[in-house]
Image: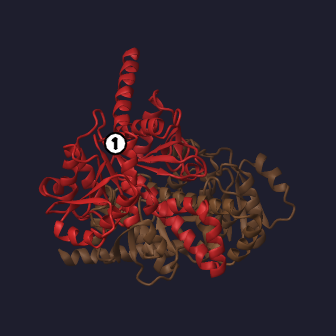
Chain colours: A red, B brown
Amino acid sequence: MRIVVDAMGSDNAPSPEVEGAVKASLKLDVEVILVGDEALLRPALDTYPKRGNVRIVHASQAITMEDNPVMAVRKKKDASVLVGLRLVKNGEADAMISAGNTGAVHVASRTIVGPIRGVARSAIATILPTLGAPVLLLDMGANVDCAARHLIDFAEMGMVYAERVLGVERPRVALLNIGAEVLKGNEVAKAVHAKLTDAEHINFIGNIEPKRLYEGRADVVVCDGFVGNVFLKTSEGAAWVVSRLVARELKATLISMLGALLSRGAFKRIRRIRDPNEHPGAPLLGVKGVVIITHGGCNSKGVANAIKGAHRAVETNLIGHIRSGIEELRSERGVAQEAKT
Amino acid sequence: MRIVVDAMGSDNAPSPEVEGAVKASLKLDVEVILVGDEALLRPALDTYPKRGNVRIVHASQAITMEDNPVMAVRKKKDASVLVGLRLVKNGEADAMISAGNTGAVHVASRTIVGPIRGVARSAIATILPTLGAPVLLLDMGANVDCAARHLIDFAEMGMVYAERVLGVERPRVALLNIGAEVLKGNEVAKAVHAKLTDAEHINFIGNIEPKRLYEGRADVVVCDGFVGNVFLKTSEGAAWVVSRLVARELKATLISMLGALLSRGAFKRIRRIRDPNEHPGAPLLGVKGVVIITHGGCNSKGVANAIKGAHRAVETNLIGHIRSGIEELRSERGVAQEAKT
């Protein structure tokens, strides 16, 4: 399996990307392709004599966090993320990961790899631990401004992902909102609620508040990408501040005791909430190729985990499942609509 | 001091309101006026022989969480929240607290008590603990759909509150967003960023992400009411799940040890993040009377804390400060604009 790493994406690029690629190459049966400025990447890579199968593909440009996504994709034709996606498009690689400008990765993926038929907007899907079963959340940041109908696409893709990849039977779909009542939320949330209630092919259980989400009361939770990203970053921030406050108060000896006890189970799960580097990256659903997003502030562990996530997505045929699942839903929906008329 | 409690507002009304009123009446030098269905309130109150100065004012109707705010305020003329606000308006009470339908409390407050001149939208302001100094956040849920200019009002009110009530010199104002870069966020966030950058009378330090917020990097943070409420409920949910995961893993003996240690400092602050009943309620800024909002799922402790919050707001002349502060800012801004032309 060949996995592209956009080596120019993260805040501290290319160090985390290069080190993460080396780490992953030693653990997984993959060829990792670092895409970026060879003059930077070659010496960085040469500092790791012990490595698996890692090679470099040169790209002369890079898209920054300050770039406007649409303009950057149009003008920076030799940007690392575009070069990497072309490798995926041409079958020279099976997946790409990027910690770069999320909007640009999104636009470039739709432009180069192409959208899955019938999906108007792609969405970043994250799996989050809860007190119950893990929950699949989307969109976590690809689309910061959404119309209600886009969230129906997200619900359908999430449903297919949960059923076919995660093995959840008849997944419970909920809408992230500030109250359980039908009328709660802003204009978009209210419109989505109405549409999801009408959609007979979706097992919609209504609005869900963050605490209920963390109780594990839903399998798939949809929201627009701005709200999703606020949710994710707030969860990380709050979990982080709680950990810090606890650590501050406890004496050093008790901390190590506590650490030893917690490291077995709870602490790992808390870290999954608190530290984005513990996440296996998040797939961009809705495009015809495996594209995994990780966060701009990632370290090498975050990159290695995202490569692992890409590896798993290819192995489980994520894209094939989403494509066929969406096609089936579309035809079912077509039949249902015809029957109604 | 006389404080009205809307006794029909919370999810479990009127029990938490009645018990909370009794608790607060025993601690504070106040007369608490319970407004609601006397047939329910009288027997509930009579179960507390030991109480301070608590009386009942009858209201035959109640606004529910399912009610449309504008319609309910128009039609339910004898709803508890309207009756209570009339007492404030007529000088028969100094403040009101409510755990009811936030939208309805907001609309009713602007209709009955009236808006402060120059403030187009009111905002719910919450003080949150951080690793540094506490931060003032607004809007936490009064306006779920905002235009950019409304957030400028919020920034101004927050600045005045921080300076005059909390004693913060030259408060740092930030915009809650999903990234630090100028171009981050949805359409509203980008427009607000541009407007706040242009506003010379506001010490705007840029976008802030949740983790930085919890580090205490800003004094006043603005956002629209939907995002603010998502932020608040997500913080509570994440802090709650972390506490639960820790508690689950630790053995009972260690828990009590830990509890004893933590109860001194950290645990109190975590509880302030995790449990909304620990909050002293949140004032609705922008109206000409003290209106304190607490959450629908509150218990009697939450109600008592909100009464305490109302007491403090009256004592510190919150409304007077906001009124005169906004007037001064408006005239400064007027002068600045004239100077420019």
Q: Does residue A26 appear in the picture of this structure?
A: yes
Residue A27 percent coordinates (x, y): 40, 58
The percent coordinates of residue A311 (x first, y second) are: 37, 49
Q: Residue at x 26, y 39 (%)?
A: A115
Residue farthest along the right direction in this orientation:
B49
User: Which is more toward the observer, A184 or A300?
Assistant: A300
Q: Mark 1 sits on what residue?
A: A147
> In the image, B155: left or right of B302?
left
Q: In which image quadrant can residue B272 be found? A: bottom right
Q: Which chain carries label 1?
A: A
Q: Can you say which quadrant of the picture contains the C terminus of chain A?
A: top left
Q: Measured along the vertical axis of the image, is residue B69 above or below residue B318?
A: above
Compare residues B189 and A164 and report the one nearer the observer.
A164
Q: Camera-side residue: B26 or B83?
A: B26
| Residue B97 placement (x, y as % from top left) | 62, 61
Would you call the spot at circle 1 few (<14 residues within 10 Å), some (14-19), or many (20 or more)? Answer: some
The reply to whether residue A298 is visible in this rendering is: no
Query: For numbered disc 1, what is the local secondary structure?
Result: loop
Res A18 → quadrant: bottom left
Lateral position of residue B28 relative to residue A166, left or right: right
Residue B103 at x, y percent in the picture: 51, 51
| Residue at far bottom of view | B169
- Taking the spot 16% from the left edge, 61% from the top edge, the residue there is A58
Q: In this view, does A224 lie above or below B241?
A: above
Q: Which amino acid does label 1 sit on?
A: Ala
Q: Which residue is drawn at 27% across and 33% down?
A: A117
